Image (cartoon, rainbow, N blue to C red):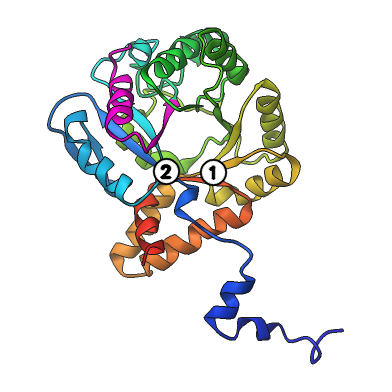
Amino acid sequence: MAFPIHRARRLRKNENIRRLVRETSLSVDDLIYPIFVEEGKNIKVEIPSMPNIYRYSLDRLDEELEEVAKLNIPAVILFGVPKHKDDIGSESWNDEGIIQKTVRYIKKNYPQLYVITDVCFCEYTSHGHCGVLKEFDVDNDETLENLKKQVVSHAKAGADMVAPSGMMDGMVKAIREALDNAGYKDIPIMSYSAKFASSYYGPFRDAAGSAPAFGDRRSYQMDFHNSREALKEVEFDIEEGADIVMVKPALAYLDIISKIRDNFNIPVAAYNVSGEYSIIKAGEKMGWIDGDKVIYETLVSIKRAGADIIITYFAKDIAKILNR
């Protein structure tokens, strides 16, 4: 039976009943905050395309970490901006590299924070691609060997979790074996399992200095026209040992998040990427939208689609909104 026996508006009458029947909730516990750390001293540089997001040198990082800890955000994911780059990104596995130093610093001074390291090479290679180049394309299997070195170095520094983002075939298997063989069997892997070749990454490349010197990344990142392929990639990563799978970007791929949630019983993360952040911040600056309300609605939509975890540059914003 429908109207007038059933009136859906009965359960929308005031905020208390709306809270009682709400299907999706958003909590600070769902959030991971990305941080960019640059090699050098006394550096705090705002990313021009990402208002209120900065690159910090390690000696200036306390002001960011103190706020993150105060807001009770449980985890950060680190991206390094090194001084030295070469063809293979060897600085990424330097035990005295910027990420390794940062991990040690956070674990010593902010033990309440869970530290995740992004595992890739685009910030570390002179050509900006995500691995070893052979004839202007990334050599998958040689890159796997370097990934092993990078994750072991991160684990040795004290990383709580590693997050491989390069979309190399077999990367989770290689990383799991490397960590286990080095005595780090308890470190989980959050794989960028369905990472699409997206135009939403533009501001991140400003932040990390990781734009490719030539070409693009479509030979390894996923074609955004495809959805069934994402399920295949996730299945491969789970078989290889991924503990958490990720979809990147989030907003244009809510259908992918939903399909993964419906098909796999594993925690699902979504990366609310730089372009998604910058679009909302630009609209807020122009006075076209209520920034706080749109941020909240946006992150709820990612949770509603099925994400358990959201990596977002809005983490501090939403933590303040939720604490009001």
- Residue picked out by circle 2: 74
- Residue picked out by circle 1: 270
Going from the N terminus, do you reach mark 2 or mark 1 first?
2
In this picture, is 266 found above or below 279? above
Looking at the image, the residue that sits furthest to the bottom is 4
Element at badge 2? loop
Dots 2, 1 in contact, CB < 8 A: no
The magenta stretch spans which residues? Answer: 95-118
In this picture, is 167 found above or below 72? above
In this picture, is 18 found above or below 172? below
Judge from the rendering whether residue 141 lies leftward or rightward of residue 42; answer left or right. Answer: right
Q: Quadrant of residue 116?
A: top left
Q: Quadrant of residue 59?
A: top left
Q: Nearer the viewer, residue 38 or 75?
A: 75
Q: Residues within 10 Å of mark 1 (few under 14, many from 20)?
A: many
Element at badge 1? strand
* Whole-percent x, y for residue 183 in the image: 52, 11
* Whole-percent x, y for residue 265 in the image: 71, 40
In this picture, is 225 found above or below 183? below
Q: Amino acid at mark 2?
A: Pro
Classify the position of the N terminus by image quarter: bottom right
Judge from the rendering whether residue 197 lies leftward or rightward of residue 113; answer left or right. Answer: right
Report the residue at 45% width, 13% height from top.
Answer: 152
Q: Amino acid at mark 1?
A: Ala
Classify the position of the C terminus by image quarter: bottom left
Q: Nearer the viewer, residue 94 or 128?
A: 94
Residue 74 falls within the magenta-colored stretch: no
Q: Quadrant of residue 219?
A: top right
Report the residue at 44% width, 50% height from top.
Answer: 276
